[in-house]
Amino acid sequence: MTDVKKMYINGEWVAAESGNTLDVTSPATGEVVGTIAFGGQKEAQMAIDAADEAFASWSALTARERAKYLSKLSGLLAKNRDELAGIIAAELGKPIRESVGEVLGAVDNFTWYAEEAKRVYGETVPSTFANKRLHVMKQPVGVVGAITPWNFPINMAARKIAPALAAGCTVVLKPAEITPLTAVKLFELIEQAGFPKGVVNLVLGDAPQIGEEFTSNKKVSKITFTGSTRVGKLLMRQAADQMKRVSFELGGHAPFIVFADADIDKAVKGLFDSKYRNTGQMCICTNRLFVHESIADEFAEKLAKRIERSGVGDGRDANVEIGPLVNQAALDKVLDHIEDAKGKGAEVLVGGSQLTEGDYAKGFFCEPTVLKGVTSEMKIVTEETFGPVVPIITFNDDEEVIKAANDSDYGLAAYMFSNDINKCLTVPERLEYGIVGVNDGSPAQTQAPFGGFKESGLGREGGKWGIEGFLETKFVSYGI
Ligand code: ADP
């Protein structure tokens, strides 16, 4: 009998009422790495009922009491680091070193918000009238429906669950169906940490059904979602009917600008970090690389050298730096962007093809690729590629490149490399992006705000900003 991983609702492990299950496969080998219960609307409703029931007592705990549970969970995550990283590598193909890093990110989030819970301060405001006192306080919004993507199976869940629980909210999580096994392990640890029943719940299954229940059920006050802009917009429309609170971390199309005065070696390293981590499957990944024409050849040559020595393979192999794409659709999209660019005159400097020989035949592997001679008519410049392909666009005018960098409906992350202090100070101010890495290819940290301008989202995760989305502001006026 297969071990079917169940949902966690009201402190119990629950199978789908329909009896449905779903196999989870490795994108590197195609083998089945686990099987989950596949629920839907019914289970989402049960989980929401449980979270609603638990809300009164959870939110009534002191922040210090809630913090104890979060700290305990953080410790359990740290203790189970290698097992969790192994699950991420198996179901997503993410290189093991990165998988370990991701688990540590989740540990850090629970530690951080255990502390941040204690700093949800109110304010007093001077009144116009001598006989009044004005107080402002923060209160938890209520039951939170959280939906997470597959590219960071544990840290995306942590970035939502940790601040929500710290604020006093209760949570129902729906992870991506491609990477649910990590979430199941997280909930095993949640159970071990001894959270009161109903405070944190896990539903697995039909995404549209669960999303519909989250957005239409009056007991849910807040939707927090990380994923595609398409689904974000859909959820926002659905949530509008009841004016539910929403936070969204959506797609990106990051520009990466290398000015003529940049340290080229540092920029190559930064580009590698921002582009090839998680096989290019991050919303803050570089999508458009703008290099000043005076240094473009040297930059391209050094980048090509760096890429040629990166190992591609199953993330579970410790020597692998770049894993597979997550599925066939992801691979097809990347190959289509490469073919489209080639057809329109781009030159392939490194890579450019699917890897199909030997063990590669079993998975969704694409060579890390660099394209030269890229122009704005190519799909790779306008659409989110989500894969290990860098298009090099050259420029010779700093004003023009800032304009080109901002020419996107997205506004999540941008990067710039320069040794000119004035440029480093003023260009970020003009980039229409929520996150800017200046001589830094991996800017995200637990304590800093993460989120986007424009169609990249709404609200911020991380640091003191990350808890705000789970709090309402209440004003109390006292006549005395
Ligand atoms: P991606 O293209 O990166 O897979 P998605 O936006 O499709 O991004 O998926 C992100 C998360 O949103 C996943 O958990 C997925 O199951 C969920 N999702 C997809 N469609 C819907 C929907 N209609 N309603 C609610 N959640 C959805």
Image: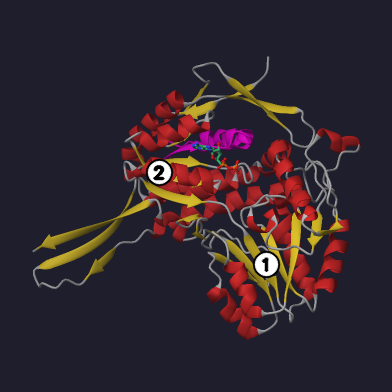
Residue sitting nearer the eye, 344 or 166: 344
The answer to which of 452 and 115 lies nearer the viewer is 452
Residue at 62% over, 82% down: 423
Name the residue nearer the viewer: 53 or 44.
44
Residue 350 drawn above or below residue 362: below
In the rendered view, does 198 fall on the left or right side of 22?
left
Task: Please provide percent x and percent y for residue 355.
Answer: 85, 42
Label 2: few (<14), some or many (≥20) within 10 Å?
Answer: few
- Quadrant of the image occupied by residue 45: top left
Task: Kindly identify the residue that appears in the image at 80 percent across and 59 percent down.
Answer: 345
Residue type at mark 1: give it. Phe
The picture quadrant where one finds residue 401 is bottom right
Q: Mark 1 vs mark 2: which is more N-terminal? A: 2
Label 1 sits on a secondary structure element that is: strand
The residue sitting at the top extreme is 1
In which of the image's four quarters is ligand 1 placed?
top right
Return the mark for residue 360. Answer: none
Mark 1 against mark 2, which lies toward the viewer?
2
Residue 300 is left or right of residue 217, and the answer is right
Looking at the image, residue 366 sits to the left or right of residue 469; the answer is right
Residue 237 numbered mark, or none: 2
Does 479 sit left or right of 444 as displayed? left
Q: Residues within 10 Å of mark 1 (few under 14, many from 20)?
A: many
- Does ligand 1 reach within 8 Å of label 2's beta carbon? no
- Depicted 383 relative to depicted 130: above or below: above
Magenta highlight range: 171-196
- Counting from the top left corner in percent of width and height, residue 296 is at 80, 73
Count of all numbered marks drawn on residues in the image: 2
Residue that mark 1 sits on = 256
Residue 416: in sight, yes or no? yes
- The amino acid sitting under disc 2 is Arg
Quadrant that contains the C terminus: bottom left
